[in-house]
């Protein structure tokens, strides 16, 4: 996301936090991915006193913006130091820079639509979450900016792009269950954006990565739509029974560490 769409990240984060109000859990370590300047950190720190932020800043932030974000997260957490997580490194290597079982909460705002392999992201979230941890997420669904794809509405100069991840909420619910998350809850809503200016609509469409970024012309007559629809998908799911047997192809595999040998002293 770019600065022009920052308001949307803030708005969706607020809605995610409202859904989190009914959740009862103890949180000491949270991964915010991607992290950005907004109100969410203040509300998370208020909701979970003593929280420690593992921040994964957006990849396009400047060095100065990253420093400000780091200082802000330290302040919000009462100066509890936590390592910064590199989103760019994850996108390159497919691995989050965190140990296994290291966070209680993963808070992901509008990221998954840009990932070519969201299932792998879920696997990494499962890996870094502790037993009893929670993944809460939001992303743009496949009907986002559908007005741009209507035949005859879009000028030939605009190169349209599809979302890297076209999952709807049912796809995500199935994937969460497939990756061993428990009790997934999915929700979806449509947000309608109205525009008086072609330039503003194009700026938002670029920020949403729905069109190529090289478009400069500010005026297309009546060919551009005057509104965009955003399909916003929300979901959360728990990590429960993380160390129990895992079933594959109807065969249960048990971690050797779960097997306890009975010794003479045990039976004495």
Image (tube, rainbow, N blue to C red):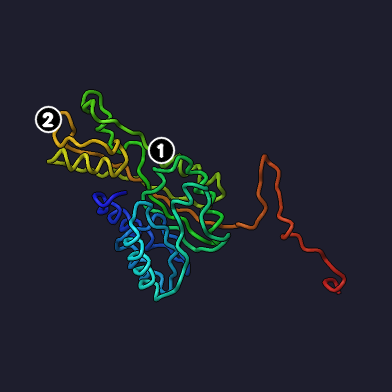
Q: Residue at x 56, y 57 (%)?
A: 240
Residue drawn 64% across and 58% down?
Answer: 243
Q: Residues within 10 Å of mark 2 (few under 14, many from 20)?
A: few
Residue 38 occupies quadrant: bottom left
**Residue drawn at point x = 40 percent, y = 38 percent:** 164
Q: Is mark 2 in CB contact (under 8 Å) with mark 1?
A: no
Left/right placement of residue 69 relative to residue 81 reads left
Query: Disc 2 designates what residue?
Result: 221
Above/below status of 256 relative to 155: below
Nearer-the-camera pick, 30 or 234: 30
Instruction: Tell me: residue 104, above or below residue 235.
Output: below
Q: Residue at x 41, y 59 (%)?
A: 32
Camera sees residue 131: no
Please give left or right for residue 136 compared with residue 191 in the image.
Answer: right
Q: How many marks?
A: 2
Question: Quick one: 66 or 12, which is closer to the camera?
Answer: 66
The quarter of the rendered structure image containing the C terminus is bottom right
Q: Quadrant of residue 45?
A: bottom left
Name the foreground residue: 240 vs 28: 28
Q: Position of residue 184 (x, y in %)?
A: 47, 50
Q: Nearer the viewer, residue 182 or 87?
A: 87
Considering the numbered disc 1 on the image, is that residue within a helix, a strand or a loop?
loop
254 shown above or below 101: above
Using residue 17 as the reference point, say whether residue 184 is left or right of it: right
Which labelled disc corresponds to residue 25? none
Give the x, y percent position of residue 28.
47, 69
Mark positioned earlier in the residue sequence (2 or 1)? 1
Residue 153 in picture, x, y percent from top left: 21, 27
Callout 1 crowding tier (Cα within 10 Å): few <14, some 14–19, many ≥20: some
Can you see residue 265?
A: yes
Q: CA distance from mark 2 to mark 1?
A: 29 Å
Residue bearing the label numbered 1: 164
């Amino acid at each position: 996301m770019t600065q022009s769409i920052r308001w949307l990240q803030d708005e969706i984060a607020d809605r995610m936090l409202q859904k989190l109000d009914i959740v009862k859990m103890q949180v000491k370590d949270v991964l915010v991915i991607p992290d950005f300047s907004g109100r969410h950190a203040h509300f998370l720190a208020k909701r979970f006193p003593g929280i420690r932020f593992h921040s994964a800043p957006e990849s396009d932030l400047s060095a100065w913006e990253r420093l400000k974000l780091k200082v802000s997260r330290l302040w919000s957490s009462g100066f509890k130091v936590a390592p910064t997580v590199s989103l760019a490194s994850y996108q390159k290597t497919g691995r989050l820079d965190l140990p296994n079982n290291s966070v209680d909460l993963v808070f992901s705002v509008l990221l998954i639509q840009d990932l070519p392999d969201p299932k792998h992201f879920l696997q990494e979230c499962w890996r870094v979450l502790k037993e009893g941890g929670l993944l809460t997420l939001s992303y743009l669904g496949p009907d986002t900016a559908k007005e741009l794809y209507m035949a005859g509405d879009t000028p030939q100069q605009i190169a349209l792009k599809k979302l890297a991840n076209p999952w709807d909420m049912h796809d995500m619910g199935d994937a969460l269950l497939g990756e061993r998350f428990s009790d997934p809850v999915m929700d979806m809503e449509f947000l309608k954006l109205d525009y008086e200016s072609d330039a503003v609509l194009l700026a938002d469409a670029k920020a949403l990565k729905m069109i190529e970024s090289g478009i400069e012309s500010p005026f297309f007559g009546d060919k551009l739509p005057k509104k965009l629809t955003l399909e916003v998908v929300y979901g959360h799911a728990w990590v429960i029974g993380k160390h129990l047997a895992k079933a594959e192809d109807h065969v249960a595999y048990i971690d050797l560490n779960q097997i306890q040998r009975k010794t003479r002293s045990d039976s004495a």
